[in-house]
Image (cartoon, coloured by chain):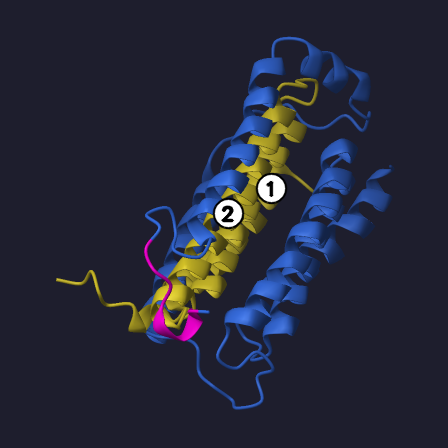
Amino acid sequence: MSGLGTALVFWPAVVGMLVTALYVFKTASMARAGLLLLASLALEGLIFLALAAEFLGVLQLLMMSGEMVIMVFFMVMFMPDPGGLMGMDMIHDKRRSAAAAVGVAVALAGVAVLTDWPAQMVDGTTPDLRQIGFEVMGRSMLSFLFAGVTILFAMVGGIMLAQQGGRLELPAPEGERR
Amino acid sequence: MISLPVVLAAGAVMFGIGLYGVLGQTNAVMVIMGVELMLGAGMLNVVGFLRYAHPDAASGTFFVLVIMTLMAVEATVGFALVVATFRHSRTAELDDLTELSG
C-alpha cells in the first residue's frame, strides 16, 4: 500500500476506533454498546492492515467479530436495562474515574511522543507472510500450542465455574430449584 | 505522516478509554468490555513496535497472538464468573456485590 493509501486508511480508522470505543461507555443500550465495541476492535484490525500486518489484521477481524457477538448476548442477558429505555446511569465515581483515565492516557501519550525512539522506520515493503508459517512450525511452536491449550482450559474452567452449583456442587439458589 | 509515536499515542488514548470503563462502570460485563479495550490498546502498541522497530521479525506476531489469547481467556473466565455471581446474587452490578467487603 502506498503512503497516501496507508494514511487514507489509518487516520479515519484511528479516529473511528477511538470514537466508537468512547461511545461504548456513553450509550445506554447494551446491544449498541456491544456492537460499538465490535466496531472499535474491527477498526483496530483495519489499522493493523494499514500497518502492513495483514495476518494480524484479518485475524483480529475474525476473532473479534465472533467474540463481540457472544458478548452482546451476555450483555443483554445480565443487564438490568439492556435496551437503555429506562435511562439508568451505569457509571459510579464518574469524575474520579474520568480523571484517572485522562491522566493515564496523557501520561502514556506523553511518553510515546517525547521518547527518542529508534530511527528505523517502515520501508513500505510488506513483511514476508511465509516467515510467520516457518515461525509457527519452528521455535514458536511451543508458545502457539500453549496458547491453544490455555484457551481449552479456560473453556473447561469457565463451564465448570458457570454450571449449576459451581465446582463445589452447592445446591442451586431458591428460585432455580426444579 | 504515520510514525511509531502516533500509533503509540492512539494506543494510549484507547487504554485510557478502557480504564475509564473499568473504573467507572457499575456492571461486571461492562468492566470486561473495558479490559478488552485495554488489551486492544496493548495489541496496537505491539503491532506498532513490530512494524516500525522490527519489521522483519516474525516472532513479534506471536506477542500479538498471546494478547489475543489473553482477551479470549479473560472474556471466558469473566463471563463464567458473571454467570456464577448472577446465580448466587441475582445481579451483576458490582456495587451490590458486597459479601467480601470488610
Expressed as whole percent of the image width and height from the top left, the position of residue A95 reads: 34, 74
Question: Which chain wears blue?
Answer: A
Expressed as whole percent of the image width and height from the top left, the position of residue A120 reads: 64, 23
Residue at 34%, 60% (x, y): give it: A171
Checking the image for residue B44, the label placed there is: 1
Residue at 66%, 53% (x, y): give it: A41
Checking the image for residue A159, the label placed there is: 2
- Give left or right: position of B73 versus A55: left
Q: Residues within 10 Å of mark 2 (few under 14, many from 20)?
A: many
| Quarter of the view holding residue B63 | top right
Position above or below: B3 against B9: above
Which residue reaches farthest left? B102
Position above or below: A103 against A26: above
Q: Chain of mark 1?
A: B
Checking the image for residue A17, the label placed there is: none
Q: Which residues are magenta?
A: A170-177
Instruction: Give amino acid for label 2.
Output: Ile
Position above or below: A135 against A168: above
Judged from the image, the secondary structure of the residue bearing numbered disc 2 is helix
Residue at 64%, 72% (x, y): give it: A31
| Quarter of the view holding residue A32 | bottom right
Q: Residues within 10 Å of mark 1 (few under 14, many from 20)?
A: many
Residue B12 visible in the picture: no
